[in-house]
Image (tube, rainbow, N blue to C red):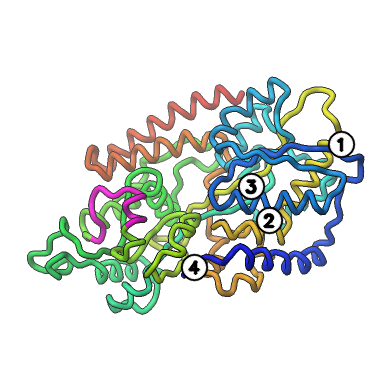
Amino acid sequence: MKKAPLTFALALGASFGLFALAQTGYRSSYTGPRVEITFWNGQSGDNRKYIDELVKRYNASHPNVSVRVTTPPGDTIAQQLPALVAGGRAPDVTSLIETMTIPNGLRGVIEEFTPPLLKQGNIDRARFYPALWNGATYGGKSYGVPVYNVAFAMFYNKDLLKKAGVSRAPRTRDEFLRAAQACTTDKAGRKPGQAGFDSRNLQTWGVGVPNGFFGATLAYSVLLQNGGNSVTEKTYDARFDTPEAAQAFGFVGDLVKRYNVSPTNMTEDSQQAAFRSGKQCFSITGTWVMVNYQGQKGLNFGVAPLPQLGGKSKTAWGGSGYLVLPKQRPGYDPNKRAAALDFINWFTLPENNLYFNQGGTMPTMPVVAKDKSYDNTPLAELFGGLNDVQIEAGFPWVDQVRGAWIGAWDNALSGKKDIRTALRDGETEAGKLVNQARKNFR
């Protein structure tokens, strides 16, 4: 499977653009004198070339606006933005990930998208998936416009599944376990459960369960599927020590320790390498990883929504990115603000979201997910499940809670702590971090 050549991609985006412009009735909201605005883009890799091309198109079609794009590392933007704002040197527009948007809004680093600002830029929040828009909304105030959407999904090796006698991608826990066990064979040809099976010397296996963010996020998805969450509903206090979380940690850890369908001590890099080399049937990871699998010689793969591994729903973890307006010094040129709003609206239109998604992200709005240009792309298999994706955002201390959750997962997976102790200690650690964060946002 090869990635679509850029020339095809450009043609695809252009053809859809004519259709979508007719549907959305886009008209530039900026009619003032020529201005230059600065845009800090936090997307690197394949995504950068699509952003650069979109900026090029905007500049070509808007003679009274010139957008100058800079691409520092995403972490650099988050670290430097408060000082740049304080010093009156902030860019006119920048992008932030979901965990940084609300905190910077509450700190007064970025503007709230008030109804008058949205109206001025012709930005219609109704076109986006509600969960995405709400990911940058706290206390009724919205701080970002969705620019991309990612989620956890299940990549599967079609040839390995066929060899194992599995006819389709699994959708339930039972189907997943049966398929993963069918895929697993030690170097002597024995299956899990057979006498003499050696889980330390696997020839092929079902799935790679890694430590760190990716393994913890799989466990977090199962927690959501069990009807739980890592925070309380109204106050967003950390809540790890629950039966739903213990079951999630137990099931995902048992893929290694009990069912023997994953090698031990895997990392995200090693599980991706195993999938690319044809040793592993399933790779449960972020959709953005697809660019690493496309074009891999001999790898015949598909993509499916995360199976229902928990007890109550099909929910999967999701993430997102937003375009935001940094605060500006007194006397800031209102023409620049007006042009920045128009640029944000244009950049997040359906046809431009469709084009940008060729870097491995997913639609931010239903009208894009329904576009026929997706009919022959692997990610299209996920679109029916986008309403099941839950963005881990909507409160200011996502990073603090997430960090403690990852620590708890690593302690449980490695056996340094039993599951209940790991969850209890993680909740205590998260509580300390949340309390400190609350002081910063008062």
Q: Provide the residue designation for mark 1.
A: 335
Q: Say left or right for 53 vs 192.
A: right
Q: Is residue 272 magenta?
A: yes
Which dot marks residue 128? 2
At which x and y percent is residue 369?
63, 66
Quarter where residue 380 is shown: bottom right
Q: Say left or right for 30 vs 385.
A: right
State the residue in front, 143 or 41: 41
Mark 4 or mark 2, earlier in chain: 4
In this view, the residue farthest toward the top is 87
The three-letter amino acid code for the residue at tag 1 is: Asn
Which is in the foreground here, disc 1 or disc 4? Answer: 4
Marks 4 and 2 in Cβ contact (< 8 Å): no
Which dot marks residue 2? 4
Q: What segment is highlighted magenta in the picture?
A: 261-273
At which x and y percent is residue 66?
80, 42
Element under disc 2: loop
> What's the CA distance linking mark 3 and mark 4?
35 Å
Element under disc 1: helix
Q: Is residue 123 above or below residue 366?
A: above
Mark 3 or mark 2, earlier in chain: 2
At which x and y percent is residue 268?
36, 49
Marks 2 and 1 in Cβ contact (< 8 Å): no
Q: Residues within 10 Å of mark 3 (few under 14, many from 20)?
A: many
Element under disc 4: loop
Q: Provide the residue designation for mark 3.
A: 134
> What's the CA distance linking mark 1 and mark 4?
44 Å
Does residue 140 appear in the picture of this structure? Answer: no
- Name the residue: 61% across, 23% down: 442
